[in-house]
Amino acid sequence: MRTPSGPGSAQQAPGRGPVRSGPPETTRTARQHAPITATGLIVKVILLGLVAGIAIWAAFPLIAAKLWVGLAVLVVTTVGLGYLYLTRRHIPAKYLVPGTIFLIAFQVFPVLYTASTAFTNFGDGHRGAKDDAIVAIGSSSVKQVPGSAEYTLAIATTGDPATGPLVFLVTDPSTGTVSAGDSDGLRPLDAADVTVTPAGKVTAAQGYTVLNFGQASVRSQEITDLVVPTPGGALRSNGLSRAYEGKAIRAYDRSCDCITDSETGRTWTADGTVGAFVAADGERLAQGWQVGVGLKNFARVLTDPNISGPFFGTLLWNFAFAIGSTGFTFGLGMAIALALHSPRMRGTNLYRVFLILPYAMPSFAMLLVWRDMFNTDFGLINNLFGLGVDWFGEAWSARVAVLLVQLWLGYPYMFLVATGALQAIPRELTEATSVDGASPWQSFRAVTLPLLLVALSPLLIASFAFNFNNINAIWFTTEGGPFAPDNPTNGATDLLITYTYRLAFGAQGAEFGLAAAVSIFIFAIVATVSAISFRRTRQQEEVYS
């Protein structure tokens, strides 16, 4: 008898219950009209409310800065998210959109910002706009002149007394008005929110922590350097209890687009190509502004002898470190995995527990421990083996030391992944080679190793990329040293990432634009090596598939 078939009919499959078939529209409609639980509704309301709150919070600084494009993007994104999650349509987008937003926020935007910074002179002395530089030049040239107004001063902060931002609490002797001042200017305080002594000194203020004499003394240099702009000049400290409103001796002249010193008559003309005020003899004022410099930072990396020499030398060691760290750890981890994979081995579970202990410990703590173990005078390595090696005092011994530390930290990971890959290789393949008369080495080289590389090549590439930028391994052990006497900015064990960090935050002054250019080079190198390696991996997969 013929089994009826057609839309909506039930068919009996052999060994199974009835299988209902129907148009996909029916299933989709049922899913769209599924009831919403109270818990789901509460979670949706809370999350959408959080999104709306964050959007409102972010809108105010965008409006204050007149960033209308950013505000428009914020509004469109917020409205789009509300529409998406308040309707029952677009189910796939509900899962894809959050990941896409986080990808843009935490991956795409930082990369684009870094790339854009590489084409500017952004750094110390070139952080803000030209108007900010003019204000900074005028404020830093303030001097006390006859007739300057004096104020009673109290030092305060809005944070930790030792590290928080400093604030001047000043009392006008003529009016008794108390004001709070920082680098953004003076703000009058309500008399009800402050406590003032008969001498005019503020002892307490709502929202501020007043520093005592000892706390203020520790930060005396910061107090001396703090300049509070005022309409008539700027406010500076005169000790820890008095302040004066001085006059700026350097002022901006819009007619010549220059800074003029009223005492010496010297002028510095604005140069838009370098973002600084430059005198006729080439002298620049320290306060400049951010401008685009095109490919200048990239050219400096390749042509400036003070940068290109250390850069290419560091690049060679960087490759040696990444390849050595990956290769040595893979070799040791694979050898241990092969030994424990043997059917003649007993107690393998116990061995595996002990072997993965380095992988279970915090790497930064172990790096600090290893740094002490390599100490020349009291380190365990020298004392245990009766050596007198100055491990971190010589270039090659320091490099050997960091590679040994990497070997100890990295082999457990390679041991784990190699163990998993070995268990996926059928024993029949290696047994077949032994039947054909192959030695264990020939069997390993012809069968086991190629299959391991096919499975582990992506992990090895990822390990190479990680070690190429492994700042912790260097910074917590050698800090990039040892350093040559004539080059304190580049050490024998510096990687490009530590060299870049020192350029960006070194004692010579931050050069974020140059550091961003070096970061672009690092990205290009790692991306090129990874692309070539993945291509070779695909070729291996085609051969052994």
Image (tube, helix red, strand yellow):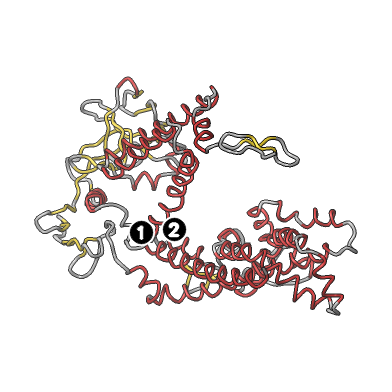
Q: Give the residue number, with chain letter if any, for mark 2.
A: 505
Q: Residue at x 23, y 65 (%)?
A: 273
Residue 401 vertical position relative to residue 108 in the rendered view, above or below: below
Classed neighbour count for the residue bearing mark 1: other residues with Cα under 10 Å, few (<14), some (14–19), many (≥20):
many
Q: Residues within 10 Å of mark 2 (few under 14, many from 20)?
A: some
Q: Amino acid at mark 2?
A: Phe
On screen, residue 232 above or below 506: above
Quarter of the rendering containing residue 511: bottom left
Report the Cα–Cα distance between label 2 and label 1. 15 Å
Q: What residue is shown at x 38% (from left), y 64% (from top)? A: 514
Mark 2 element type: helix
Relative image position of residue 142 (x, y in whole percent): 23, 48
Identify the residue position indicated by label 1 in the image: 117
Q: Label 1 sits on what residue type? A: Thr
Q: Nearer the viewer, residue 392 or 356?
A: 356
- Left-right relation of 486 to 126: right
Residue 399 in the image: above or below residue 79: below
Task: Identify the image quadrant of the C terminus.
Answer: bottom right
Question: Left of 200 or right of it: where is 309?
Answer: right
List x then y, in percent, for residue 87. 43, 31
Where, by quadrant of the figure, is residue 226 drawn? top left
The one nearer the camera, 448 or 233, is: 448
